[in-house]
C-alpha cells in the first residue's frame, strides 16, 4: 500500500504543473529498441538512468547542462571522477542533485523517481532486460512517466546518431543534435575516406578492455564497441571471431598465439572501484607520465610474453569512457594514427576533441585521454 499511496500522491501532484504540460507538444518518438513512446516535448524534467549520460546531455545543453536533470544514477563520481569534479566545481548545486542506484543491480528507487515528477526517463539499452523484468516501464507509465532507451554502448556505431536525434527531439534541440551528428560524421570520414583511398594493409589489433582493473586477463570486445572502432580505424580486431557479442573474454594463450601487431588498452581512474589497481588512469586532465608508467607495467603480464606489439612498442591506452558516449570519433582518429602513422601524420585527434569541447561541451578541454609506449605516436 505504501508504494501505491505514494504513486497516488505523485499523480495528484501532476495537476500542479498541468499548465506547463499544456504548452508542450505531445509527440510519438521511437527509441533505439523500436518502441513508440508518447512524450510531451520539449521535456523540462529528466531522470538520467546513468550519470555518464551527462556526456550527451552536455553536448545539447552546453550553457546549462543540468537544467533539466532532476535526478541521475550515482556512477559518474566513481567511473569518471575527474569529469565529475570538473562539473561539480563549475556547477556546485550538482552536489544536491538526487541520485539513484542502478536497475541492473536492483537498487533503483522507483518511489523516489515518481516523487521527482520527471517528463521522461532516459535509460541505456544495456539495462533493458533488468528494467523489463522488474516491470519498471509499466509502473512508470501508470503515473505518466515515459521511459525511452538510448545506446552508446552496445552498438554505438549504429545507434549513436539515432540516439542523438531522439534526445534532440526530446530537448527541443534538433538543430544542435544535427550539428553534432555532422561534426561526428565528418570527423570519422577523415579516417575512413583516407583508408578507402590508400587501402593499406590492416594490422592485427588486440583491444583489451579495462586492462589492470582486475588480475584476470583478458577482457575484450567482439565485433562492436571498441572492436568495431578498431575496424573503422583501419585495423583487424583480434577478438571479433572469438567473442560472439559486444563484450567477452579471451585467454592469455589466445593473445600469444595471435601475436597482434598492436595492443590498445582501455583505461580510466578507477580508484573508487579498485584502489591502487594496475589500471591505466587516462582521462580528463590525467597525469600522462604516470599513465604511461602503468601501461608499461601491464606489458609484463604473461599474456603479452613475446608478442610483436610489445617488442615493437606498439602498445597504447585510450580512455575507457569512449565506449559509452557519443565522442567515439575522437578515439577512432587516435587509433588510426597509432595503426597507420604514415597515413595520418597530419590528423590531430587532440584538436578534434578540443573543438568538440569548444563548440558543444560545458567544460574546457584538458588532455590526458591517450598514452602510448611508442613516443613517435
Image (spheres, rainbow, N blue to C red):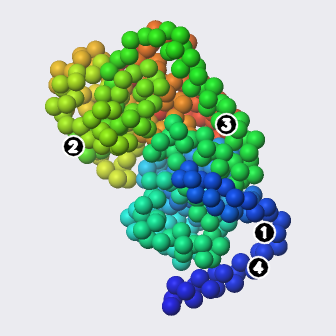
The answer to whether 227 is drawn above or below residue 195 in the figure is below
Labels 2 and 4 touching (C-beta < 8 A) = no
- Between the C-alphas of marks 1 and 4, the distance is 10 Å
- Between the C-alphas of marks 1 and 2, the distance is 52 Å
Labels 2 and 3 touching (C-beta < 8 A) = no
Label 2 vs 4, first from the N-terminus: 4
- Between the C-alphas of marks 4 and 3, the distance is 36 Å
Q: Position of residue 251 (x, y in %)?
A: 19, 37
Q: Position of residue 360 (x, y in %)?
A: 67, 39
Labels 4 and 3 touching (C-beta < 8 A) = no
SS of the residue under disc 3: helix
Q: Quadrant of residue 358?
A: top right
- Between the C-alphas of marks 3 and 1, the distance is 28 Å
Determine if residue 298 is in view. yes
Quick one: 141 or 191, which is closer to the camera?
A: 141
Residue bearing mark 3: 180
Residue bearing mark 2: 216
Label 1 vs 2, first from the N-terminus: 1
**Crowd class of label 4 (few under 14; some 14 to 19; many from 20; radius 10 Å):** few
Label 3 vs 1, first from the N-terminus: 1
Q: Nearer the viewer, mark 1 or mark 4?
A: 1
- Between the C-alphas of marks 2 and 4, the distance is 54 Å
Quick one: 133 or 342, which is closer to the camera?
A: 133
Label 4 vs 3, first from the N-terminus: 4
Tell me the number on the disc at residue 306.
none
Q: Quadrant of residue 216?
A: top left
Amino acid at each position: 500500500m505504501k508504494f501505491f499511496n505514494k504513486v497516488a500522491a505523485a499523480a495528484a501532484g501532476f495537476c500542479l504543473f498541468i499548465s506547463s504540460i499544456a504548452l508542450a507538444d505531445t509527440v510519438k518518438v521511437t527509441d533505439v529498441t523500436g518502441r513508440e513512446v508518447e512524450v510531451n516535448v520539449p521535456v523540462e524534467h529528466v531522470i538520467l538512468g546513468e550519470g555518464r549520460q551527462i556526456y550527451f546531455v552536455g553536448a545539447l545543453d552546453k550553457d546549462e547542462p543540468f537544467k533539466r536533470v532532476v535526478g541521475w544514477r550515482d556512477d559518474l563520481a566513481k567511473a569518471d571522477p575527474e569529469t565529475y569534479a570538473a562539473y561539480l566545481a563549475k556547477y556546485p548545486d550538482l552536489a544536491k542533485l538526487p541520485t539513484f542506484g542502478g536497475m541492473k543491480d536492483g537498487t533503483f528507487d522507483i518511489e523516489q523517481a515518481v516523487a521527482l515528477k520527471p517528463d521522461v526517463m532516459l535509460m541505456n539499452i544495456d539495462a533493458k532486460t533488468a528494467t523489463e523484468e522488474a516491470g519498471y516501464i509499466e509502473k512508470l507509465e501508470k503515473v505518466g512517466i515515459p521511459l525511452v532507451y538510448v545506446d552508446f554502448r552496445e552498438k554505438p556505431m549504429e545507434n549513436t546518431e539515432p540516439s542523438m536525434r531522439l534526445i534532440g527531439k526530446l530537448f527541443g534541440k534538433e538543430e544542435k543534435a544535427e550539428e553534432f551528428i555532422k561534426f561526428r560524421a565528418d570527423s570519422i570520414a577523415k579516417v575512413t575516406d583516407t583508408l578507402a583511398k590508400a587501402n593499406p594493409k590492416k594490422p592485427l589489433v588486440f583491444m583489451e578492455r579495462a586492462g589492470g582493473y582486475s588480475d584476470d586477463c583478458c577482457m575484450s570486445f567482439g565485433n562492436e564497441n571498441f572492436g568495431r572502432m578498431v575496424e573503422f580505424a583501419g585495423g583487424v580486431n583480434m577478438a571479433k571471431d572469438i567473442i560472439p557479442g559486444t563484450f567477452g573474454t579471451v585467454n592469455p594463450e589466445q593473445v600469444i598465439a595471435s601475436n597482434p601487431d598492436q595492443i590498445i588498452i582501455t583505461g580510466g581512474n578507477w580508484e573508487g572501484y579498485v584502489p591502487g589497481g594496475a589500471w591505466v588512469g587516462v582521462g580528463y586532465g590525467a597525469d600522462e607520465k604516470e599513465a604511461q608508467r602503468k601501461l608499461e607495467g601491464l606489458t609484463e603480464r604473461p599474456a603479452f610474453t613475446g608478442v610483436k606489439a610489445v617488442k615493437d612498442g606498439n602498445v597504447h591506452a585510450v580512455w575507457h569512457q569512449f565506449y559509452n558516449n557519443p565522442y567515439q570519433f575522437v578515439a577512432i582518429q587516435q587509433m588510426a594514427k597509432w595503426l597507420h602513422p604514415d597515413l595520418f601524420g597530419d590528423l590531430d585527434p587532440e584538436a578534434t576533441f578540443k573543438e568538440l569541447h569548444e563548440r558543444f561541451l560545458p567544460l574546457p578541454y584538458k588532455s590526458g585521454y591517450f598514452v602510448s609506449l611508442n613516443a613517435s605516436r
